[in-house]
Amino acid sequence: MAPEEMKPGFSENAVKVLEKRYLRKDEAGKVNETPAELLWRVANAVAAAEEQWGFDRQTRAEEFYGIMSRLLFLPNSPTLMNAGSDLGQLSACFVLPIGDSMEEIFDTLKATALVHKSGGGTGFNFSKIRPAGDIVRSTSGVASGPISFMELFNDATEVVKQGGMRRGANMGILEASHPDIFDFIKAKTTRGRLANFNLSVGIPDALMQAVKENGEWDLRNPRSGEVVSTVKAAELFDLLVESAWASGDPGLVFLDRINDGNPTPQAGRIESTNPCGEQPLLPYESCNLGSINLVRFLDEEGRFDWEKLGEVVETAVRFLDDVIEMNHYPIPPIGEQSRQNRKIGLGIMGWAEVLFEKGIPYGSQESVSLAEEVMSFIQSRGHEASEALAEERGCFPNWEGSVWGKQGRKMRNATVTTIAPTGTLSILADCSSGIEPVFALAYRRKTFETETLSVLNGILLKRLEERGLMRPGLLEAISESGSLEGLDLPEEVRRVFQTSHEIPFEAHVRMQAAFQRFTDNAVSKTINLPNEADREDIRRAFWLSYESGCKGITVYRDRCKESQVLYSGSLEKPEAQSKESPTLPRRRPSMLRGTTVKIMTGFGNLYLTVNEMDSRPFEVFATLGKSGKDTQAHTEALGRLISLALRSGVPVEEVVSQLKGIGGSQPVWEADGIILSLPDAIARGLERAGGFKVDSQGAEMCPSCGSSLIHSEGCIRCRSCDFSKCD
């Protein structure tokens, strides 16, 4: 049992997240596990590994429970979800191989589904697939190219939900020498395409050199190795800049640099990363992650307790190594490859609060120096902990021939440190995500019921009170904008409490590079830019990341995607009230003509009748062939509301855009793709009846709690609850 005197320090909102997603439930869906019982379940299950080496399981479990219950350290979500369960899959990060044959591709598709089902995210390099239009000798046909297979994986991801809560996440990489690279770069500038993928271009050093020298670049058929065309390197780079400016995709992955740091080059070349880019892995390799909540190691004067931090690092490394022993891998090849290198990824969260508490501006030289000091300490102590485990348990099997083996340094784990995004973990730990700055100093937080809370950063509130800066209307002004920009406050306060979009991109990149210098794997970080940033800013960010030693880069220009709806501030800015009378729905004439379409759904066939007036959709009748009364009622209600919107002048394309892509519990395959839910089916029916197609970027609001979504670390995530496209 969990130690009675060590109750977990979860906040009220963290408990709501735990109840929604992590705590066990009975057959009726009622929570039957407490937060303390969850942490003990995890600690006890992981500590079972200790018995192999003669250690007491109870003692280790209490040690593991202690660092989790005090929110000093938390493991990745699959460990919290699955430890001590029949599923028992504990890793977050996977890379799977993609070959050039149908057999290889569909074998990987099956493995992907199993990984997503268990809560993991997957990365792929599609560069081995022959280009579109190439020959297929076995069938005398024409190849469809890598992007078509990416769409297949994207659709499959839409069907397989992780834990019934969120869909899986993918990283899709195509190397810059592939003949289809131009189409790949532009893929996500089409709204809604490959929505379950983060995209990155594999960039070799030779391409960057060719761009610098205004040279040419060869595109080669991966099937034959032959050069099929030669382009200007600058033309390719310009398109990368343009697409990233327009949509945030693709990012860049510097594969040569990643392989320069590959600890086991004798075991193969690293070709891909996990969905958020922080974990380069060999094919069939996985990694389990955990993060230390740095702000919990500051004393009242804002000084680090280095001794306490070192002790937690050692315990966390032991915990993560034990996870490898207790993990139930989705398929045997993943287990075999993962145990060969025993990679773990220990990182941090709460970095923004550390800087706030210490009064250091994000991205300043002082903050960069502190980042290097903190991460070098964690890496050094982490390596020492792995060495100690190697003495107890032996080196990782691929140690001979590895970088560590050549140094004569015995290690239990090929890699120890990683900077991961901590979307859900940071909510549980009540801190900021990873090494990101705060998105806003104030924002609205919806609970899982109906209450909406206005949240103001606690450290800022404390500083304002300490310095006597509070005055009437100040909190309201901060809440409205989400930042201190333009407010009458001392410059040193405004410089410290900057939000993500106020920080220059150079400062974002410098921070990523500082942590990368002392991280074995890689760093997940979004380089946020304001909406007014131009293409030259993107270009400079790309070059700065390459020249400063980063292993990759993801940029995101505010509001470059129509689906982004969370902006700084906790209060809506009211639209100017129209002086005109409100729009009333048009009257229905006595006779209308229309079209009826049939769409397969998970609840039976949907029959959608769309009547027109003046050659435009005017009303909708939606009925199900056979279903329960409640589902019938919901379907009829949707039809009535859509009809009201159409009769009030709302364009049908806008209606479709809102409904299309909404996920449900019973998706089905239909003739032209996947039908995700009844709303999605109605959207498809409206498209067919009207003879048009609308691409959907996905839901604007969190499907779990209804709060706004933000784009962070290459993911779409909710800042109020645990929903995330990649976590």
Image (cartoon, rainbow, N blue to C red):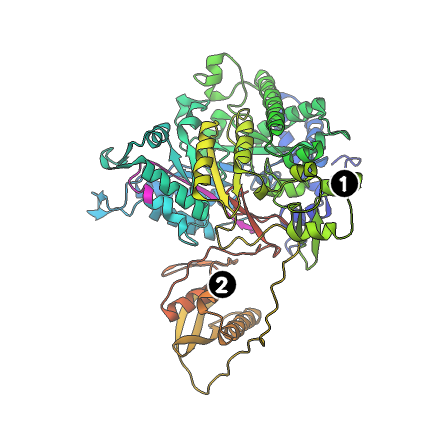
Q: Nearer the viewer, mark 2 or mark 1?
A: 1
Q: Amino acid at mark 2?
A: Leu
Marking on residue 152: none
* CA neighbours of label 2 inside 10 A, class few (<14), some (14 to 19), many (20+): many
Query: What's the mark number on residue 659?
Result: 2
Between 653 and 633, the one lying in front of the other is 653
The image shows a total of numbered marks equal to: 2
Q: 720 and 500: which one is in front?
A: 500
Q: Is residue 71 above or below residue 685?
A: above
Residue type, label 1? Lys
Classify 10 Å Cα crowding around label 1: few (below 14), some (14-19), many (20 and above). Answer: few
Instruction: Give the answer, above or below, for where 49 lies relative to 191.
Output: above
Q: Position of residue 180 (x, y in %)?
A: 30, 42
Q: Is residue 458 above or below residue 312?
A: below
Q: Can you identify the residue that label 1 sits on?
A: 462
Residue 81 rendering spot, x and y as whole percentages: 60, 42
Residue 39 seen by the camera: yes
Front residue of 43 and 553: 553
Instruction: Give, as a single range, the part of the protein colored magenta.
Output: 163-182
Considering the image in quadrants, where does the N terminus appear? top right
Q: Quadrant of residue 244?
A: top left
* Helix, strand or loop under label 2: helix
**Which residue is depicted at the point 52% across and 29% down?**
513
Distance Cα–Cα, label 2 vs label 1: 43 Å
